Each structure stands twice: as structure tokens, then as C-alpha cells.
Image: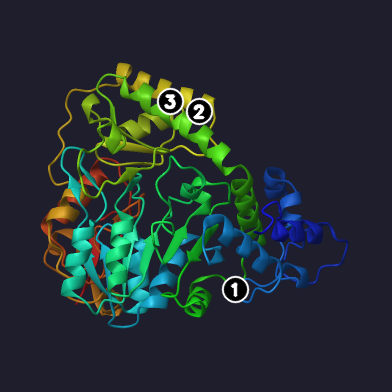
Amino acid sequence: MLNQNQTPLLNALKANAARPHAPFYTPGHKQGEGISQPLADLFGKAVFRADLTELADLDNLFAPQGVIQEAQQLAAEAFGASQTWFLVNGSTCGIEAAILATCGTGDKIILPRNVHSSAIAGLILSGAIPIFLNPEYDAVLDIAHSITPNAVESALQQHPDAKAVLVVYPTYYGVCGDLSAIANITHQYNIPLLVDEAHGAHFAFHPQLPTPALAAGADLTVQSIHKVLGAMTQASMLHIQGKRIDGDRISKALQLVQSTSPSYLLLASLDAARQQMALHGKMLMSRTLQLANEARTRISQIPRLSVLSPPSQGGLGGSPSFEALDETRLTVTVSGLGLTGFEAEEILDEKLGVTAEFASLQHLTFIISLGNTPADIQQLVQGFTTLAQEYRQTNLTLKSQTWENIVSTVSHPLHFSPREAFFAASEILPLVKTSDRICAEIICPYPPGIPVLMPGEVITKPVLDYLQQIQAMGGFISGCNDTSLKTLKVAK
């Protein structure tokens, strides 16, 4: 057992920030002496004194032998891994590295169609061929959940030469599928199970939360420590266990997708966040769950609003892709008020002082974390109370072709691999002329960053209609060259 009270990287950074010396190395602001005054006024000088480079005492992220290695070993023990890597380019680079380390050009990987855009980037970088599985779709709630064990088993029977399976756990809505069953099936083929656990870094620290991916049998998992715990934005971790993943290949892949000038502020925040959770995680998560349950209970009592609840509370009945729900994730259905999720989000943010994580056509989703307070919950509940009383409409008409419906029921033929399509000769056409052409760019509403179209897929009219619908209702479309969505890039 390691001493989880320790913060070796944070301590080394603190000591070097305070050490008197003449700095003739990067960064150019030289511990804040050259920083602009407006920036210094906003952040103070202390943060810039700690903005250091790979000094002798601070170790090297790509060949750790000192304090970074010690900090990563502490994190591995705290999160239940055999080996852990700190990430400064977010979970995005972790997902990309996981695919690069397990798949080469032409290798097959099985994954859900509602993966994050980082997985598509991993396909483009590696040249891997995706075998997409449609997630289970709840037509009542208009939410796509997880893929099922049966779907994975069927895909592996058809593609026994697949090199890996990748699963999203939990989804953006906090829904967790039966990961243990998927792991058992995947391991029967002796291939690794990779997990995008970006929103599940807190699972290891409270028994009321869903089973952590590693405990469920995953071989590799990537977690955004900044999304739900106390690290700074972009600070994430990649964990592995067992012998199906080559740690050296992970290290080499990460060198391709991470900055060679990693921020020690981000790295130290990972060290500190790990210590905080190792020492106080259960208490912090107990408090967070209490706040989340209060919000869920009170908002569910507001007329014409409903909330996504765990299966034990009648969440989704017997859906095989809904094994558990992260109860710190709150999804509120607002269509009963005659409002779209986008309209409700705008009112809450601009007029009622409540900002959601993201909106969809019928829902708003909120992340309740260790940083929230009882006052936040009171403002959230009051915001929805006011929304229901003062902003209710009666003219909402939602089109039936929502994204979750599209991704679950409409085939997107993949004529080229994502890599081939990405690098193929292309042309830009008016949107109305792109139906049945092959897409050459990644296009997705953001958040949550799930692509509606990706390089290599045939563009269909329902998808074009959906994108225009999202844009008309106030959603934001990212990834496309033309942000006005009047044109699209297609393969020639």
C-alpha cells in the first residue's frame, strides 16, 4: 500500500516555483515576470511562478523516473489500475492512443455509433476499420443508451478477427450498460475491452455509484478527471490492467498525440485530485449524491417536468442497456412545458442564472459534482420552478427524426474507411446537393460531441434535416468547414 497522503509532483512543483534562481528556459514569461498585467490581475502571479517546464526535479512526462512516475503509481493504486498515465490533452488523446495502441491500418474495431468524436479521430489516425453497433434507443425519452452484450457477441461472431471492442461507459446522460457481461464476451476472443469512461472518474469512490470500468473487467479506461473531480480542464488519466494491452505501445502512442511541452499546472492538478479522492472521496461523493438526489426529488415534483431516474426507481424498466445510472448526472425532460431543450437552456442561463452542461431537443443535462453547493441546488430548483410557471409554451412541435432516432434506426453506409475519406480528394458543395454523397469531415452537435456524420459515411436526407433542425432550434454544430452549414465537404 502506498501513502496516499503524498503529492510528490505537487510538492516538487511548489518547491521549484519558490526556488530563487535566474531562469533562462521556457516559458517566455519567466515565472510571471513577463506576463501581461491584465492576465496577472485576473490570475495573480502565483500561478505563473508554477508554470514551469521539464526541470531536473520535475521529471519528464514521456520518460518518467521521478515525481511523475511516483504520482502515476499513486493514481494507479487509487483508481484500481496496474498502470496509469497522466494526460494533458484531455481524454481525447487517451482515446486516440488506446485505438493506436491496439489497431493498425485495416484492423477492425467494434464500437457504438454514438462514440465521441475523439474515437473517430482515432480511426483516422490509425487506419482502423469501424464495426459500428447501434445503441439501444428509448423512444419515449428520445435518448440513446449503451450497446448490449448480445450486440457485442453477435458482432464478434461475425468479425472474430476484430482487434478490440470500445464501449462508452457511462453515456453523457449517465447511463451504464452491462459492462461486466461485455468484458466477459470480449475476453472470450482474447481481445481487449477499451472504455471511454470520461464521465465516470468518480465511480471508484462510492458504493452507490456504478461499478468502475476496471472493476467490471475493462482492460483499458480513459477518465476525464477534470470533468467530475477536482483537476483542471484538460487533465485526464489513462489506466490499464491485465496483459492484453501493451503498456509500451500506449506510451509510444501517447507521444504522438500529447504535447511535448506538457503543462505542469495540469499534471500537478491530477496529483492533487487523486490525493483528495483517495483520502476523502467517499465523504465527498456522499455529499454530492445527497445534493443530486435532493435536486432529482424536488424537480420531479414540478408539474410537466420529469427526470431520468435509476431502473430501481422506474427509470427505464427492463432495458438491457440500462444496467445502472450515475445519480450525480441529472437529466430533465422539458418538452412538457412546450419548450425545446435549447430554449429552456437559454432561458435558464440568461435569465435565471442556471447553466446546464448541455441541451438536446427535449432535455437538459446537469453535472452535479463535488464542487456544487446546497445554494447551487436551491438555485437550480428555483430556476426550474420559475421556468415552469412563467415560460411555459403551448406550441411545441418536435419532429420525429431526432438524432437518437437516426443513430439507432438509420443505416449510414461506410464506403471508405474514415482515414481514406479524410485524406481523399474532396470538394465543397451546397448542402442541398450533398445527399447520397460521401462525407469528408466530422460533423457533430456539441456538446456532447457525438458525430452525426463522419468521413467515409454516405450523407442521407434525414441526417441533413436533423442538422438543420438542430441549428434552427439554437443548437451548435461543430467540425464542419462551413459553420453556417450552407455547404459540406464531400469526397470526389
Q: Name the residue under label 2.
A: 376
Per the model, the C-alpha gap separating discs 3 and 1 is 44 Å
Based on the displayed image, in which of its 4 quarters is residue 59 positioned? bottom right
- The circle on residue 188 is none
Q: Nearer the viewer, mark 3 or mark 1?
A: 3
Among the two numbered marks 2 and 1 on one chain, the one whose residue lies closer to the N terminus = 1
Q: Name the residue under label 3.
A: 294
- Between 461 and 360, the one lying in front of the other is 360
The residue under the point 41% across, 67% down is 219
Q: Mark 1 points at which residue?
A: 260
Among the two numbered marks 2 and 3 on one chain, the one whose residue lies closer to the N terminus = 3
Mark 1 surroundings: few (<14), some (14-19) or many (≥20) residues within 10 A = few
> Are the two marked residues, 3 and 1, in contact with CB atoms closer than 8 angstroms?
no
Q: Is residue 262 left or right of residue 142?
A: right
Q: Residue 443, can we see it?
A: no
- Between 239 and 298, the one lying in front of the other is 239
Residue furthest bottom as drawn:
105
Q: Is residue 263 left or right of residue 212?
A: right
Per the model, the C-alpha gap separating discs 2 and 3 is 11 Å
- Residue 346 lies, in percent from the top left, at 36, 33
Q: Residue 82, can we see it?
A: yes
Q: How is the model colour-coded? A: rainbow
- Between 10 and 239, the one lying in front of the other is 239
The kind of residue on which mark 1 rests is Thr
The kind of residue on which mark 3 rests is Glu
> Are the two marked residues, 2 and 1, in contact with CB atoms closer than 8 angstroms?
no
Of the 4 image quadrants, the one containing the N terminus is bottom right
Per the model, the C-alpha gap separating discs 2 and 1 is 39 Å
